[in-house]
């Protein structure tokens, strides 16, 4: 499967409909969205690495529970570190930070279906990257539409923010709401689907 | 039964190792967490000093730590020129969904709430342009500014709070914390 296919047809958010909750709740600002994506990517890789080490110690029916436990451990660890060094990030993510363990569990759960053992790491990396890029893209798009700005980084007492939309273009605040996010998700999903179908047709045409 | 025993043992071992590692990491960074909490408390106290309306002639006493209470973490007596305690500043830590925030509340000796100051702005707005509703205005809490409630926080009804979607637990915990602080001061600095 090519990189484009991973990003379009097998995109976790728009292709497979996974991880929508953080997309709706946290993508109202680019910095919050990108941090969520980054934590998800780290969780996917750390979870995969840890589980690989203890794969032989547990029978396969138990492994899914162990996977959940491993992800919970990593997210708890991340939460402690974020609370100590980036409290404003913890405040922005709120309840959705611990919930990322469930999100990552669901993201990973789809992997064994179409991944062979040799490509396991590559598949996880692409899945995590796909999620990171998608939530970052939605975050940037939503923030520009709803506030007319893009917030790249927020540190204690310092924010890197650019104004994109100036008069006469006015932002539509509705898109910062979860309902606005859902509508935007629908349009973006349709766009991604259209691109995936188009790519598939081009590929079939090349093959024939 | 015997078949599952080794699996049970391994899962238990994994849980214990995870708990131990989390404990070690938390212990390692707890200094940083306490440092931040202290900084926030100092900035809240600074906010009190900047607002001269609240006991400008009073002097701050030493902070006294309170253990085994849900929200009250410490208190500072504010003394008048004769050395008598006029007001009591209570440091409260109400919980929200995840994590917590700090709150500095001033009470009279009788436990009547004079005013309070929150660590961060707590208005469930959709963007910086939106205006709070009349219901929301009643509990509008602005960062770095004292909210004066001479008639008492108990005038705020639970139903009014529940009209604020998404902030119910936050505001209920604020109410509970302020009530606990009042009972604490009324009881002369003892657990009610």
Image: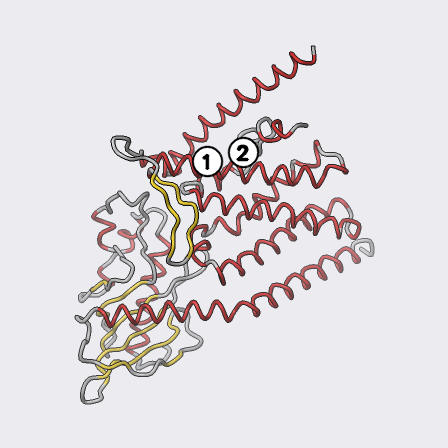
Q: Chain of mark 2?
A: A
For label 2, the SS is: loop
Label 2 with label 1: CB-CB less than 8 Å: yes
> Quadrant of residue A143 in the image?
top left
* Residue A13 tag number: 2
For label 1, the SS is: helix
Distance, label 2 to label 1, CA atoms, is 10 Å
Q: Which percent across, then down, holds residue A140? A: 43, 38
Q: Are marks 2 and 1 on the same chain?
A: yes
Residue that appears at 29% across and 72% down:
B182
* Residue A138 tag number: 1
Callout 1: few (<14), some (14-19), or many (20+) C-alpha neighbours within 10 Å?
many
Residue that appears at 60% across and 40% down:
A128
Q: Is residue B141 left or right of residue B2?
A: left
> Quadrant of residue A16 in the image?
top right
Q: Is residue B141 left or right of residue B19?
A: left
Q: Which percent across, then down, holds residue A144? A: 37, 36
């Amino acid at each position: 499967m090519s990189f484009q296919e991973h990003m379009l047809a097998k995109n976790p958010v728009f292709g497979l409909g996974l991880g929508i909750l953080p997309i709706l709740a946290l993508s109202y600002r680019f910095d919050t969205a990108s941090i969520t994506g980054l934590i998800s990517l780290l969780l996917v890789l750390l979870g995969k690495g840890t589980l690989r080490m203890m794969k032989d110690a547990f029978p396969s029916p138990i492994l899914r529970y162990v996977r959940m436990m491993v992800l919970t451990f990593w997210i708890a660890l991340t939460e402690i570190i974020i609370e100590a060094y980036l409290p404003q990030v913890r405040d922005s993510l709120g309840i959705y930070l611990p919930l990322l363990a469930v999100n990552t569990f669901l993201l990973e759960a789809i992997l064994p279906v179409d991944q062979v053992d040799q490509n396991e790491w590559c598949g996880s990396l692409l899945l995590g990257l796909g999620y990171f890029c998608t939530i970052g893209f939605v975050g940037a798009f939503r923030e520009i539409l709803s506030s007319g700005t893009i917030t790249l980084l927020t540190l204690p007492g310092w924010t890197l923010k650019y104004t994109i939309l100036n008069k006469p273009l006015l932002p539509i605040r509705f898109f910062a709401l979860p309902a606005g996010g859902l509508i935007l998700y629908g349009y973006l999903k349709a766009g991604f689907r259209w691109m995936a179908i188009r790519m598939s047709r081009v590929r079939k045409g090349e093959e024939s | 039964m015997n078949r599952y025993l080794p699996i049970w043992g391994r899962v238990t071992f994994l849980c214990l190792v995870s708990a131990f590692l989390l404990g070690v990491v938390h212990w390692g960074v707890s200094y940083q967490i306490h440092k931040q909490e202290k900084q926030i408390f100092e900035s809240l106290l600074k906010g009190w000093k900047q607002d001269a309306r609240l006991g400008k002639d009073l002097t701050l006493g030493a902070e006294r730590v309170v253990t085994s209470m849900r929200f009250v973490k410490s208190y500072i007596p504010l003394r008048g020129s004769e050395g008598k305690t006029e007001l009591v500043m209570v440091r409260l830590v109400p919980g929200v969904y995840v994590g917590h925030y700090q709150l500095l509340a001033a009470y009279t000796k009788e436990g009547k709430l004079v005013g309070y100051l929150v660590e961060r702005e707590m208005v469930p707005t959709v963007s910086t342009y939106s205006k709070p509703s009349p219901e929301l205005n009643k509990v509008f809490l602005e960062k770095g500014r004292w909210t004066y409630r001479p008639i008492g926080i108990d005038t705020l009804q639970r139903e009014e709070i529940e009209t604020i979607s998404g902030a119910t637990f936050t505001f209920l915990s604020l109410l509970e914390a302020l009530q606990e602080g009042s009972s604490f001061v009324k009881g002369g600095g003892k657990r009610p």
